[in-house]
Image (cartoon, rainbow, N blue to C red):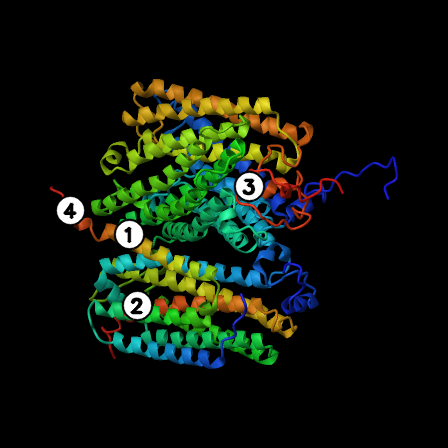
Amino acid sequence: MESVGTVVPPRTHYVNATYGLRSWLLTIDHKRIALLYLGSVTFFFFLGGLFAVLIRIELLTPKGDIFQAETYNRLFTMHGVVMVFFFLIPAIPAVLGNFLVPLMIGAKDLAFPKLNLLSWYIYNLGALFTVVAIVAGGVDTGWTFYTPYSSTYSNGNVVLTGLGVFITGFSSILTGLNFIVTIHTMRAPGLTWFRLPLFIWSHYATSLIMILGTPVIAITVLLLALERIAHVGIFDPALGGDPVLFQHLFWFYSHPAVYIMVLPAMGVISELVANMTRKNVFGYKFVAFASMAIAVFGFLVWGHHMFVSTQSVYAGLVFSFLSYAVAIPSAVKVFNWTATLYKSSISYNTPILYAFGFIGFFIIGGMTGLFLAALGVDVHVHDTYFVVAHFHYIMVGGTIMGFLGGLHYWWPKITGRMYPEGWARFAALVIFVGFNLTFFPQFLAGYMGMPRRYYAYPDEFQVLNVMSTSGASILGVGYLIPMVYLLWSMRYGPVAPANPWGAFGLEWRTSSPPPTENFLETPVVTWEAYDFNPDEERELIDITRH
Amino acid sequence: MSEHVVSKKTYFLIFGALMVLTTLTVFIANFDLGPLNVIVALSIAVLKATLVVLYFMHVRYSSKLTWVFVGAGFFWLAILIAFTFSDFATRSWVVIAK
Amino acid sequence: MCSSGLSTQDSALSKHGRESHSTSDWACAPLRQHGATARSRHAGDVGVFDHRNHVLRGLFLSYILYRTKFPDSFAAASSHLDWKLGAFNTAVLIFSSLTMALAVYYSQVGDRRKLLGFLVLTIILGLTFLVVKAIEYHEKYVTHHVPGPFFGFKWDEPAGDPRQAEMFYYIYFAMTGVHALHMVIGIGIMLVLVLMAKRGRFTPEYHSPVEISGLYWHFVDIVWIFLFPLLYLLGAHIHSH
């Protein structure tokens, strides 16, 4: 029917299917919602980063010379609140997870597309409360909101911030619920549980934590707000309450929340390692079950944040022991990734560089976590920079490396364009160097006794702090470079083929970017996970041209 | 997940059982049995809740996914209470020298 | 299997202007993107069960903890709740669970008149519960047993420490307040169901909104089944009449 000389219209995909702001703000396409989330979390990442910059500038010199102690307290609190609740927790699940879960299981969308959109609005409503709290002067309790300081003495905007956290919690719950139902009911024909990509397993485990844990933090923050407003409560010793109860309730969610942050990153790393070596992940089932084990064990260890809080030492013993138990599934993952890499032919692209970074940082962060899980050692290093360095190695070194690695790896799929490889490798290197220079000295400072959350410190810690601040500057630049070239590539990058990496997985079997309904026909899976042997069935399901 | 229509008779039976159990728990509460009061009251409550979950909420006829969630919810509640109590109950075991 | 066409369930759905491609084979699930009966029921189950177990967890923990710590004050404070009203409300709620279950039953068999009747009955029972609750709250307000300086909490009883009694009432109001809020939401949902049922939106094939709302209603009932003995019966033996 085609007559010679007619211009072939550009292929319709999810980005150009409809136009206008309305078509984005009211979209129920999981891919577009993922991009909405990407915009939101990027904003909060740079907002949280701004607070970090101010903190590091203050700590350049031993004396408190730029900010008042009070202001400094607000800075580190807002840094923590913004980064934890508005970036780290939603980053990978809400952006990459949202985009990829349906694609990876061969579905057209999530089970509840409207709920998915609603979760983005709820996230932004919570974020709005928090931003208002920041603008109104911030909050100074630390992101942990410990009572009785937060309930009685603090004069920051505890209630507003708490409400922000409370509301945002519901967006996590909705996302988790959506993922679980989707993974249970919408897998493509033939895609059995043990054929699922490991990314899906880790998101399944994450979703479990989200819906089982988040309601507890919601009610806890609400009780805190009530106690602060109405002066009645269960945490205030003056009312006969026990402030440690707050810590129990808080960490019952917030410790598993660490696994909400790192499990999806582990899923990303499993994908990167498998696809960049073009090998099945060594011990696939072990890695899958390790995700579930981490999700379950993660709920049993919260007391290790409370070793010096007057918590009973007997409870401490139990929590200490169980904390060591979490090391087992975590180590299983590291060993299996390493075993996959061993004697493989690795494509040294940007994504695998981030995966290497993740594995290294995770080992350092995880091993120092074992120091902290030991009762005696924790008494010595509790609330020092050792702890700060430890959880930044996990949360920044782990989650952000996973996020950036995943973003690069799936960027061609998301945008249909390739990013500039040279710049990307350079940025990965800058981030690696900057990160280590920022946080490794903090281990040393903390071990030597520098406490966290002070705006001034003894002179002997200055060298280490100058190193840390200079590292943070490098790290900041490292984060800005991808921001620039990724935006640039959306317009000027080379057009990406459907599967630029020769990768495995259903998401690479549709065109880049995918059509709104993901697959033109429902894929039927007849192969095992990460089965890289050539097979004629692997042809693209979506024909790129109409 | 084929649908299972529970008969009206089952509903009435469960309703009767729930009312009997309510009367029983109120009756027992009038005696001071010491710690047994709580145990009896909670056992009856668990029994009643189980009846509601299994029959009124049709969990007895539901998918595995539902069972997983019902189980996980109770398991997680048990964890929260048990581990928190491992703290509060054992705090006084160590006598700190003054 | 996957192309085996529409099941009866879905043809009924289509009649109501819903796009649907559902089949009974789970493996064909991706095809039923816009359909939803089975899936939404499924997920409705999950959502409701999730909710029930978690929202009140923190409060239950606090209750158990402080009750263990201050048994006498808690029992003394509890004895000032009217267990007769509590028992009456328990009966009302259990009865409303029965009417709700019957409403679901009649939606399954497709009797619209009886479905409407039982929905309305459920609403009336829910309102009865709330009225009794309001009477109780008012009594607490008059006797200054509402916690906090704002309500001028007073405790003139010989038994029990005032602060510990206040804590009991705090937990009492928090728990019953959250519960009553869920009741109000539930009644709102029932009103929507009545409107939908009046318009003939439910058929034996499509009634998952009734079912899911039923799950929600029973969950509210279950919470009360626990709250009643924990809050009201704790001190009943002190004043055994």
Q: Give how far apart the Cα atoms at labels 2 and 3 are.
A: 44 Å
Which secondary structure lies at badge 1? helix
Which residue is under mark 2? B42
| Three-letter code, disc 4 | Val
Seen from the viewer's position, the closer of residues A146 and C81 is: A146
Which residue is under mark 1? B84
Chain of the residue that carries numbered disc 2 in the rendered image: B
Which residue is under mark 4? B94
Which secondary structure lies at badge 4? loop
Seen from the viewer's position, the closer of residues B71 and C236 is: B71
Where C52 falls versus A159 (above or below)? below
For marks 1 and 4 on the same chain, the one whose residue lies earlier in the sequence? 1
Residue shown at 24% from the left, 52% from the top: B86
Q: Are marks 1 and 4 on the same chain?
A: yes
| Three-letter code, disc 2 | Leu
List x then y, in percent, for residue C115.
Answer: 57, 77
List x then y, in percent, for residue A77.
Answer: 41, 36
Q: Are marks 3 and 1 on the same chain?
A: no
Which residue is under mark 3? A95
Verify CB contact (< 8 Å) between mark 1 and mark 4: no
Q: Give how far apart the Cα atoms at labels 3 and 1 are.
A: 35 Å
Q: Is residue B76 left or right of residue C205?
A: left
| Three-letter code, disc 1 | Thr
